[in-house]
Image: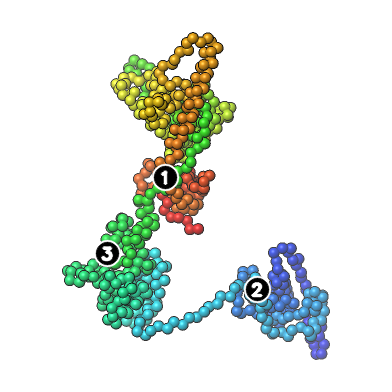
Amino acid sequence: MKVSGGDLSHVGFVIGKAKVAPKHRHTVPRLELCAAVLAVQLGQTIEEELSIPSKDMNFYTDSKVVLGYLHNRVRRFYIYVSNRVGRILAFSQPDQWTYIPTNLNPADQGPSVLKDQVQPVGTKFELVNPDKDAEVRPQVKVVSKVTVVKTEVSQSGLGIERFESFSSLQSLVRAIAWIIHIADSFRKTNGICRGWHRCSSSLTVDAGKRATYLIIREVQNKFYGTEIECLKAGNPISKNSNILSLSPVLDEDGLLRVGGRMCRAQIPLSQKNPVLIPGKAYIAKLVIMDCHEKVSHQGRHFTEGMVRQSGYWITGGKRLIYQLLSQCVKCKKLRGKMCQQRMADLLDARLTPAPPFTYVGVDVFGPWNIVARRTRGGFSNSKRWAVMFTCLTCREVHIELVEEMSSSSFINSLRRFQSIRGKVKEFRSDRGTNFVGASDDVHIDAINVEDVFLRKHLYVSGTVWKFNPPCSSHMVGSCERMIGVIRRVLDSLLLEEIGKNLTHEVLSTFMCEVMAIVNARPITTVSSDAESPFILTPNTLLTQKTGDSVEPFTNLDVTEAYKSHWKYAQVLSDQFWKRWQREFLPTLQQRRKWHKEHPNLQEGDVVLLQDKGLPRNRWPLGVVSRVFPGYDGLVRKVEVRISRDGKHSNFIRPVVDLVKLIEVQQ
């Protein structure tokens, strides 16, 4: 503090304060600015303790960058500098700050007398290299343009690019009608309304009609200004005009209408001479969507008819209507097609030669009512289900009956199957309620593959169980196809048992006969060549038999019989796999459907989730929360998050069960 009296002055040390600078992420100008904030804090303390007003204080700094920040009145700063400059200027004025060289700064040299080398108080300081300073916002240059407009053309100044801020035709018309009403209020031509206000006078039919005409005139002047000038001057339209074939005319409201050859028709003017709207204008989209909503989101034919009945002629309207209706979210909810993706390649298990029932698909079907025992009053009935095991490589089937849908009963059937057919390397099944856990919560009969006993049995046998996504039976089509074949054969066998009591023994016999019939089917086309009588069937490899009879070994001793039988079995096996590779594998090459690649679903896409138990208008909406691309990069299953009754749930579904409504913007 400096005290002056007469020719003498005294400088005394009052208070000092220092802070340790952080190590990282602070530049020197920022540290100097923080030091200036610390000086202001000391000034506030002195003002409170010594009752010295802030206007009598002077502040010195050796940073011209900080002085430029405080004296700046042109450029804007980022938040860090802006907050601290505001705090400094809230206590002091820029004129109270001045520059002092570093070698004379008391903060560096300790208390000393301020000498004459100090800049006088009130000196103005400019920003130091503001274009290179990272704390100063870039300067926005505003270039004013002068537009020369002919006095013959009246310009309303609305600007059709502003129409794109509206999502519907009605909202645009209401806004323009309100603006016209306000303009009339300032002109004092609308009666009692004056100045800025909102009232019901702008919502009348006449006000809406006036606003609609103004909007259309703005659009027509933008796109067909040359044609309008020619018609006003009485000159013919240029031959290069794209509306020449429509013979456009101007009506008394200044609107460009379609002329044509129907001038003498006794029909309304809106149908005889519809208003011409350019298809490239945004207003054309608003008109089409407004008419589309009037016909309750019907197809292109209905929408186009409503556009014409409303008195509009849109150039290129058919193509524009098709484009807009294909993007309509409500139409997608009502009639949108399910998503598709190119059919995936076959699994390795379908293409790799392996012993029968090495790779197995599993499914359960049924039940059937059977007679369990006779009682005094009649019969006691029970149910039976069938577990089908199908070889994914050779296409054989094996059927086991189960008494109940439980993990214990299924383990028994699994052990019987493996005892007959041998060890299985991999099981595959759908993720239906027959095989997944949590079945006790919904009180249904189900086989719980996640049950601890079944998991232990699979672990001990060294078997892997793989699930397909829920509701995607097409991903395990080989099993579904076999169930269809088995049901048709079984229906034929049960047709003769109508009216009879079906027992477990009879049903078990039927299942064995079904297995024999299905495994004896040809898996390739039957050749008409007489030199190739051998038919390729699953039984060829499974039983090593090609017909009903077996040729006996004659004139051979025991050693030769065993040797010949081994050769016979090896020949049949070799023939099977050669023909399997030559005749059966090529039939799997062709994709029967889903040939094209489609854009993948992405996280954030809004989709409609198919629920076969509900009508389509009650299917839930969802958002794709996760995608699962395949090895080829194509997404065939996704995780969808939906909300029901205020609760969020996630479901994994194939894309064929989804309808994409809104695509996320990248």
Q: Helix or strand or loop: what does disc 2 sit on?
A: loop
Q: Would residue 576 be visible to someone looking at this image? A: yes
At label 1, the amino acid type is: Trp
* CA distance separating discs 1 and 2: 58 Å
As drawn, which residue projects farthest toward the front?
Answer: 531
The disc, 2 or 3, on the residue closer to the chain's N-terminal end is 2
Check disc 1: other Cα within 10 Å, few if <14, some if 14-19, many if 20+: few
* CA distance separating discs 2 and 3: 60 Å
* CA distance separating discs 3 and 1: 39 Å
Residue marked by disc 2: 132
Please state which of the two labelled residues, at mark 3 or mark 1, is closer to the viewer: 1
Measured along the vertical axis of the image, is residue 523 above or below residue 286? above
Please state which of the two labelled residues, at mark 1 or mark 2, is closer to the viewer: 1
Q: Where is residue 150 in the image (x, y as percent from the top left)?
A: 38, 84
Q: Where is residue 117 in the image (x, y as percent from the top left)?
A: 78, 84
Question: Residue at 58% across / 29% down in the picture?
Answer: 462
Measured along the vertical axis of the image, is residue 346 above or below residue 12? above
Is 635 placed left or right of 260 in the picture?
right
Measured along the vertical axis of the image, is residue 473 above or below residue 258? above
Question: Residue at 52% across / 48% down in the picture?
Answer: 633
Residue marked by disc 1: 594
Task: Locate the N terminus and report the quarter of the image it occupies.
Answer: bottom right
The disc, 1 or 2, on the residue closer to the chain's N-terminal end is 2
At label 2, the amino acid type is: Lys
Residue marked by disc 3: 308
Q: Where is residue 558 in the image (x, y as percent from the top left)?
A: 53, 10
Q: Helix or strand or loop: what does disc 3 sit on?
A: helix
